[in-house]
Image (tube, grey):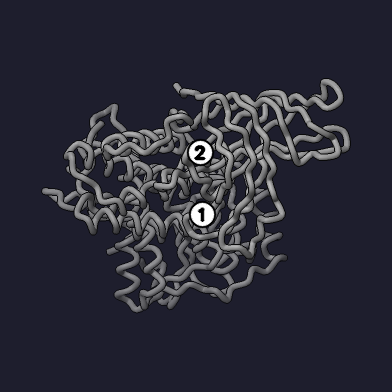
Amino acid sequence: MQRLAGFSLIAYDTNCLVYYCFLVDIPETNPKITITVRQTEQARAVTDYLVSHQQKVTTIQAAYEELNDCIYNAVEERMTDREVEAQLGYSQNEKVPDLRKLQVQQSVERKARKLENKGWFVLDREYAADASALVRLQQFFNSQDPAKFGRSKRPKSVDMKLVDFSLLRQAPLVTNDRGISNFSNELKTAGLGFAIHNLMDLTVS
Amino acid sequence: MDQQASIIGNLALKPVWDRLSESEADCSYELESQTAPSGILQTGRSVITTSRGEVVRVLPLASVTAGEQSFSVSSPDLFEAAGIIVDEPTSHKIVNVAPTISNEGMIRVEGVTSKMYLASSEGESRLISHVIAGQFAFRSWSNVSLVQGQCSTSITSLAGSFPLLRTERSDKQGDTLDILASQIRKLHDEFAQWPGSYNQLLLAGSLDYCKSALTKAMRSNVVLHEEIIRSMRSYYADCLGILDQCQDTKATLRRLNLQKIQDKFEILQDTWSRHGIYPRLAELDISDIPRE
């Protein structure tokens, strides 16, 4: 976490916010059943560390507007995972009912919407993307070796805005998207990005 | 799967469309009709209201143009005569209108289908697919408001059978719940097949909740308060409206603002929970979800 030390603001992408909020208790279960995603523990550990060091988490409006899509994707992926199916008592060929998925979706969404009330979270509504910066970023990503994106898709407009926002605010960007974090050094060298870290690569001591 | 009911009779409709003013509290139009052989059609006056007291501008179910003349055939009177009040025809689509003029003064209308929402006076909502096929003869080309002819009407419900001749509400709540549960199950199955998105899960999940709540209530033989049934019917009708709106372009569902539906689902949950029949979604534990 030394990599994030000393910065008052840390930028998160939408998925990192969703992972932080993806902690859903199923009522009246004994033993208690809590549904999380693989990244929840790391997202909470990193965030708790930042909060305890009086650092703030921030994101941009465009990323926040993607919350619903990101929540749905995370819910769908997790609730069709055999581990969760078994956790909820469904056999191999049984699907988790839609109402249970919706229960989780709504719970995550409620938590995500409440982030705005947290003292440590700042939704930056002031940021306006610089069109020329976005063009340069687009050209940068277009010129990269496709293999380096790994299994990630090429960055979308909102991803490039986050990179630009991070640079503009001089706030390190935490993302779960290898399609961005794999280019951290190159972006910095090209003067297009600030520090970009993959959530799962951060070590919380 | 779907049953059909047919009416064959003589129609003489004289809709007074200009009476349908948005400033009026209720809409009305005059209906002149001869009693059909089946005894369904009545001479009289049809009043069209909505449950919210909104004024509904009744759209013709079939618009036919013959030469330079045009006229409209409106069918709500058929439903009205059968004891159904047209309620919020929020969806209306003429899928295919293919009139052919067979000779002067005669017109043949085939394959005219449309969809609209109907609700019985008890608030039972159904999506109706309405088909008109038959021959219409103008008494006079100069007086096209009077239409006389033979009309063969078949009605199918998307969500099961909807025999026009048997629309009276059953006195047994079990029957009502059976029908509602079947409608909700079919609608849920439909949305469950749609491309995944936040909104798709909202609809599929909330209908699954309704299905689950009804199943549990029916299995435990509890008598449901009318408010519960009404709220569920109303929610079902709203979801049906979205189905109809996005049926041809399912991907657009993702971008719709469904805040109104979401709020309504919250109220529905409150109603079930307040009556102690079924917990709110957030409080559902494993045992609350009946296995199929």
Q: Quadrant of residue B219?
A: top left
Q: Amino acid at mark 2?
A: Leu
Residue designated by label 1: B50
The location of residue B103, given as percent across then percent down, is: 85, 21
**Quadrant of image for the N terminus of chain A:** bottom left
Q: Report the chain holding disc 1.
A: B
Mark 1–mark 2 Cα distance, whole angstroms, equals: 16 Å
Q: Is residue B98 left or right of residue A172?
A: right
Please state the total of marks drawn on the protein image: 2
Residue designated by label 2: B127
Q: Amino acid at mark 1?
A: Thr
In primary-sequence order, the first of circles 1 and 2 is 1
Q: Nearer the viewer, mark 1 or mark 2?
A: 1
Residue occupying the point 68% across, 45% down: B15
Tag 2's secondary structure?
Answer: strand
Q: Nearer the viewer, residue B216 or A176?
A: B216
Q: Is residue B133 visible?
A: yes
The location of residue B29, given as percent across then percent down, is: 63, 50
Q: Is residue A191 left or right of residue A25?
A: right
User: Would you call the spot at circle 2 few (<14 residues within 10 Å), some (14-19), or many (20 or more)?
Assistant: many
User: Would you call the spot at circle 1 few (<14 residues within 10 Å), some (14-19), or many (20 or more)?
Assistant: some
